[in-house]
């Protein structure tokens, strides 16, 4: 068993080039993270089939998605502590073990209960992997090359959720729903085996104090908000708890949680350090990214409804209609990353936010007579906008922090990303549902009412996107020198291990 001395490195990483084997290590983490994040949305198209096969209601089936998001929201805020306390290898093995076991549970589930357990265990592993990937890139990749690597990470964050419904539709068209997990399982096992051989200690560890009360407050805050927002966005009429209760609990717990972290961070005892918010580049970039994730997840939930309920497409065609947009994001992300390394964030973020806003406003034109090529073109346009802003925002916001705050910044980033996804879904679906209900009450037929609801929801999304356009003009390139930062710049930097594939850290 390694001691604290074993886990640290006597030398300091070269800030101008990556350690040997770092690219391969990051590649393994990217593949693992992509497969995991894919499962966040892969169930959306499968819910109608599961309702029939498992004899469950829509509200019950929705827990397969809500439970996944809820677990992510509870676990991710603790990763700032976990990455300080445990080595990269330990966290990686824990993450892959949880995800693999959860996938096996889901694949062999005879009924809803074990399937839900599998989804929750999957989510616990997924919640560790994405912050782990981001934290590894920030520690190993020099500032001048981070855009390229963050471009790859943006494929995981944006493309994996976008192609999830497509993959789900293709599988369900030919196979049983359990194959959504059986096909993922061997990929997870290979990533586990390869990673177990490659992943070594990359960052030093310490023994920060564990604050159990903060963990409870975090679970109540982010869990309550995600659950409440998810209930707003989906059918919750079978729930005995009013929707406002978990939201109110979440808001109160969040206020207490933040105040507790601020009070404890001066003595380095905070579960989640709030100092990253003192860096304007981080705060503005994070705010813009949240708007982008609201647009992405809102569109991912609303476009399939439009294609199936208004245009009458089946699940396979719906999934294929959304595929070009997902592929566009994947193809553009590496090029955007390289462009960021050359020109910085503003020349990319400003036009990207305008493109995203234009796409959302264009969606307000969709109706029952819209041609399919027009729908695909608008979705691709939205994907271009997202691809153009995701990488610059991630790189500039997280890269603006000092090294000792990377793990906390990554935890904040991923937590609020999940919260924004839930908020986007809730916003779009709630506006759509309430508008449709109002139209039906006034005498409109169901098709016209649904069309009006979707139109109003996209109108709301377009209005929100204008805030992102305004914020884009305040984005700045982070300082290339990792020692030049606002906030805790006087704190001595921790050494970073350069041992990746040359054996355990000494």
Image: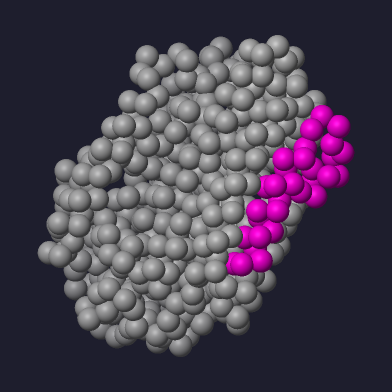
Q: Is residue 306 left or right of residue 17?
A: right
Residue 454 location (% of width, % of height): 67, 32
- Is residue 363 visible in the rendered image? The answer is yes
Point 75% across, 20% down: residue:
447
Indicate whether 114 appears above or below 15: above
User: Above or below — where is 74 with respect to 209?
Assistant: above
Residue 140 coordinates in the image, percent (x, y):
43, 75
In the picture shown, does residue 500 fall above or below 436?
Answer: below
Q: Quadrant of the N terminus?
A: bottom left
Q: Could you say which quadrant of the image residue 314 lies in?
A: top right
Please give left or right for residue 198 compared with residue 406 in the image: right
* Residue sitting farthest toward the front: 442
In the rendered view, would you say 241 is above or below 91?
A: above
Question: Residue 234 location in percent, x, y?
Answer: 52, 26
Say which residue appears at 70% left-offset and 53% top-offset.
358
Does residue 157 appear to the left or right of 220 in the view shown? right
Q: Nearer the viewer, residue 246 or 363?
A: 363
Is 227 magenta? The answer is: no
Q: Main secondary structure of the magenta part?
A: helix
Relative image position of residue 484 (x, y in whole percent)? 34, 83
State the count of labels.
0
- Left or right: where does residue 131 sit relative to residue 318? left
Using the image as rendered, state which of residue 109 and residue 146 is in the foreground.
146
Image quarter of residue 241: top left
| 364 part of magenta stretch | yes
Magenta highlight range: 349-378
Tell me which residue sits at (74%, 54%) in the image: 381
Which residue is located at x 46 percent, y 27 percent? 231
Image quarter hosting the C terminus: bottom left
């Amino acid at each position: 068993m390694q001691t604290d001395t074993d886990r640290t490195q006597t030398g300091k990483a070269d800030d101008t080039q990556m350690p040997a084997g770092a690219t391969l290590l990051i590649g393994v983490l990217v593949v693992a993270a992509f497969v995991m994040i894919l499962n966040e949305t892969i169930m959306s198209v499968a819910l109608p089939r599961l309702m029939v096969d498992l004899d469950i209601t829509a509200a019950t089936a929705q827990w397969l998605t809500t439970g996944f998001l809820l677990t992510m929201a509870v676990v991710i805020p603790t990763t700032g502590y976990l990455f300080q306390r445990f080595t990269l290898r330990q966290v990686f093995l824990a993450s892959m073990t949880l995800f693999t076991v959860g996938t096996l549970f889901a694949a062999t589930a005879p009924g809803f209960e074990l399937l839900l357990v599998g989804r929750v265990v999957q989510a616990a592993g997924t919640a560790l992997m994405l912050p782990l990937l981001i934290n590894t890139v920030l520690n190993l990749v020099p500032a001048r090359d981070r855009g390229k690597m963050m471009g790859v990470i943006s494929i995981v964050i944006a493309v994996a959720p976008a192609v999830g419904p497509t993959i789900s539709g293709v599988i369900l068209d030919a196979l049983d729903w359990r194959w959504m997990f059986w096909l993922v399982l061997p990929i997870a096992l290979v990533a586990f085996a390869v990673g177990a051989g490659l992943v070594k200690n990359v960052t030093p560890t310490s023994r920060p104090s564990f604050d159990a009360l903060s963990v409870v407050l975090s679970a109540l805050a982010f869990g309550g908000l995600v659950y409440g927002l998810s209930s707003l966005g989906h059918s919750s009429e079978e729930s005995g708890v009013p929707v406002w209760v978990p939201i109110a609990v979440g808001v109160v717990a969040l206020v207490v949680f933040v105040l507790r972290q601020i009070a404890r961070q001066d003595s380095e005892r905070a579960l989640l350090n709030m100092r990253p918010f003192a860096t304007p580049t981080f705060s503005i970039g994070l705010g813009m990214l949240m708007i982008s994730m609201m647009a992405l997840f809102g569109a991912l939930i609303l476009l399939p409804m439009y294609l199936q309920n208004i245009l009458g497409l089946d699940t396979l065609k719906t999934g294929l209609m959304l595929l070009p947009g997902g592929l566009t994001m994947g193809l553009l992300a590496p090029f955007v990353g390289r462009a960021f390394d050359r020109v910085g964030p503003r020349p990319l973020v400003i036009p990207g936010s305008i493109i995203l806003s234009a796409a959302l406003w264009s969606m307000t034109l969709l109706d029952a007579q819209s041609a399919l090529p027009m729908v695909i073109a608008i979705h691709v346009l939205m994907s271009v906008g997202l691809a153009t802003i995701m990488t610059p925002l991630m790189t500039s916001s997280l890269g603006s922090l000092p090294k000792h705050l990377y793990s906390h910044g990554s935890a904040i980033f991923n937590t609020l990303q999940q919260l924004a996804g839930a908020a986007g879904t809730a916003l779009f679906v709630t506006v759509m549902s309430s508008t449709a209900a109002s139209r039906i009450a006034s005498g409109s037929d169901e098709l016209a009412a649904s069309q009006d609801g979707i139109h109003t929801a996209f109108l709301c999304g377009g209005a929100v996107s204008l805030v992102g356009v305004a914020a884009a003009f305040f984005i700045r390139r982070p300082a290339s020198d990792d020692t030049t930062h606002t906030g805790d710049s006087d704190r001595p930097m921790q050494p970073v291990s350069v041992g990746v594939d040359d054996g355990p850290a000494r």
